[in-house]
Structures are given as C-alpha cells and as structure tokens.
Image (cartoon, helix red, strand yellow):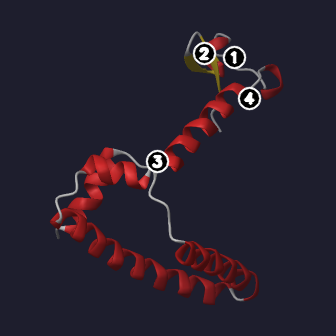
Amino acid sequence: MRRSVLVTGRYWPFRDLHGGQGVSAADVDLTGPLADWNAHLSLVCDKAVPLSEPLAALLVEITEQLTATTEDAPLVALRAVGMLERIAARVGREAASALAHDGVSAEAVAAGLGTTRSKAQTLLLRGRV
C-alpha cells in the first residue's frame, strides 16, 4: 500500500519526505488524507443516481446469498457469479444503448454513475456495438 501525507496542499509519498528512506505509519497522521478521500467519496455518492429500494434490497440479498454459498459450495458460487456477469454485461449494454440513443452526454452519465467522463464514454460506446 502506498502511503502519502498532505504537505503544502499536495500529497507526497512518504519516501519523498525523508530522502527516499520512508517512514512508518506511526510517524505520520494519515487521518487528513483519509478524511479527504472519505469526503470525496461522499460527494460522488451524493451526486450519483439512487437505486430504487427493491433493486437495492435485491442486490443486498444476492450478495448475502453468494457470500453464504461461497463458504459452503465455492464452485456453485463461482458459477452463479459467472451467470451474473453475463447478465450484467448484457443489461449494461442495453442500458448504455438506450442512453446513447436518447443523446445523454458522457458528462451526465459520469455524474449519474459517480465515475469519470472517460469511463462513462467507454460505457456509452459499448452500447453502440
């Protein structure tokens, strides 16, 4: 794990602060960068389009079922994950195609998904295939 510390408004890798020697986590308070990152994630999450309650509950249930199945029958869980990946890929292409057809911009998709414009553009292009 790379560690960094905020100095004069910029995060520097530990090794750069001590002539390449590095320091231990005990030597530097990392709560500043962690708090900044958590605040950023909070802002991104707040701007993303919310999932409906039934869909969110279904995703939680699937996660719990897969986790339990992984403990008891990992091969079955792996098969189910493969099926979900194929379903997600197909439905994702259909959703991206609908957004592209409606002329939704990459910026709007990025904001709605809480991702970068580049990632949103890639998703929209996949929908056109």
Q: Kindly report the distance in space between the C-alpha atoms of the residues bearing marks 2 and 3.
A: 35 Å
Q: Kindly report the distance in space between the C-alpha atoms of the residues bearing marks 1 and 2.
A: 8 Å
Q: Going 67% across and 32% down the picture, which residue do you hit?
A: 35
Q: Going 48% across and 81% down the picture, which residue do you hit?
A: 84
| On screen, residue 128 above or below 49 | below
Left or right of 86 in this view: 35 = right
Name the quadrant of the N terminus: top right
Q: Going 58% across and 19% down the picture, which residue do you hit?
A: 12
Q: Kindly report the distance in space between the C-alpha atoms of the residues bearing marks 4 and 1.
A: 22 Å
- Nearer the N terminus, badge 1 or badge 2? 2
Q: Nearer the viewer, residue 97 or 19?
A: 97
Q: Position of residue 26 (x, y in %)?
A: 83, 25
| On screen, residue 37 above or below 98 | above
Three-letter code for the amino acid on which mark 2 is drawn: Asp
Q: Position of residue 112 (x, y in %)?
A: 39, 54
- Nearer the N terminus, badge 2 or badge 4? 2
Left or right of 112 in this view: 3 = right
In front: label 1 or label 3 = 3
Name the quadrant of the C terminus: bottom left
Badge 3 element: helix
- Nearer the N terminus, badge 2 or badge 3? 2
Quadrant of the rendered image containing residue 29 = top right
Q: Which residue, given by chain and number where applicable, does mark 2 sit on?
A: 16
Q: Which residue, given by chain and number where applicable, does mark 4 sit on?
A: 31
Q: Which residue, given by chain and number where applicable, does mark 3 sit on?
A: 47
| On screen, residue 27 above or below 104 | above
C-beta proximity under 8 Å, tags 1 and 2: no
Badge 1 element: loop
Q: Which residue, given by chain and number where applicable, does mark 1 sit on?
A: 21
Three-letter code for the amino acid on which mark 1 is drawn: Gln
- Nearer the N terminus, badge 4 or badge 3? 4
Q: Nearer the viewer, residue 76 or 106?
A: 106
